Amino acid sequence: MTQDRRSEERKNIELPVRWDGPTGTYEARLQDISLWGCFVNTSERVELKEILTVEIRLPTAKWLSLRGEVTSYKPGNGFGILFSFLTDEEEEALKDLLAS
């Protein structure tokens, strides 16, 4: 993936997400997603540049696990994550979600 990530369309979608942090497992809501990353609505704190595995519950009820780096954090609102470790299968699953 060598495109400018801002050229990818973001899809507004609300899906359940969960992730493990240093103090436990958290649940939240996905606000939007693109092939490059997503924004998670949560009041939980994360650290910039933290590497997280975010699990997204797809409309099919399956969970899609994606690893990435926290690139933005808005206290009380949520955080943005850049999917920096996508496999080919994960990229295909994201493309399917974006096309639905």
Image (cartoon, helix red, strand yellow):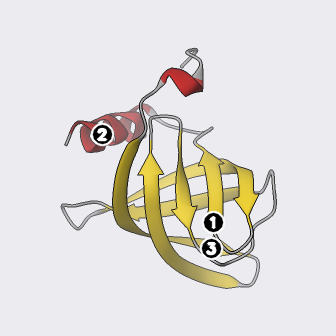
Q: Secondary structure at mark 2?
A: helix
Residue 51: percent from the left, percent from the top?
72, 54
Q: Quadrant of the C terminus?
A: top left
Mark 3: amino acid: Asp
* Residue farthest toward the bottom in the current orientation of the protein: 24
How far apart are labels 3 and 2 at the CA level?
Answer: 24 Å
Residue 72: percent from the left, percent from the top?
73, 51
Q: Secondary structure at mark 3?
A: strand
Is 28 in front, or is 91? 28
- Residue 46 sits above or below residue 11 on the image: below
What residue is pinned by disc 3? 20
Q: Secondary structure at mark 1?
A: strand
How far apart are labels 2 and 1 at the CA level?
Answer: 21 Å
Residue 94: percent from the left, percent from the top?
36, 41
What residue is pinned by disc 1? 78
Front disc: 2 or 1: 1
Residue 96: percent from the left, percent from the top?
25, 39
Q: Earlier in the sequence, mark 1 or mark 3?
A: 3
What residue is pinned by disc 2? 98
Determine whether, in the image, residue 9 is placed left or right of residue 38.
Answer: left
The structure residue drawn at horizontal position 45% and vertical position 59%, both measured from the top left corner, is 31
Q: Earlier in the sequence, mark 2 or mark 1?
A: 1
The structure residue drawn at horizontal position 74% and vertical position 74%, both measured from the top left corner, is 45
Label 3 packing within 10 angstroms: few (<14), some (14-19), many (20+): few
Determine whether, in the image, residue 39 is placed left or right of residue 49.
Answer: left
Is 41 in front, or is 81? 41
- Residue 30 sits above or below residue 45 on the image: above
Label 1 packing within 10 angstroms: few (<14), some (14-19), many (20+): many
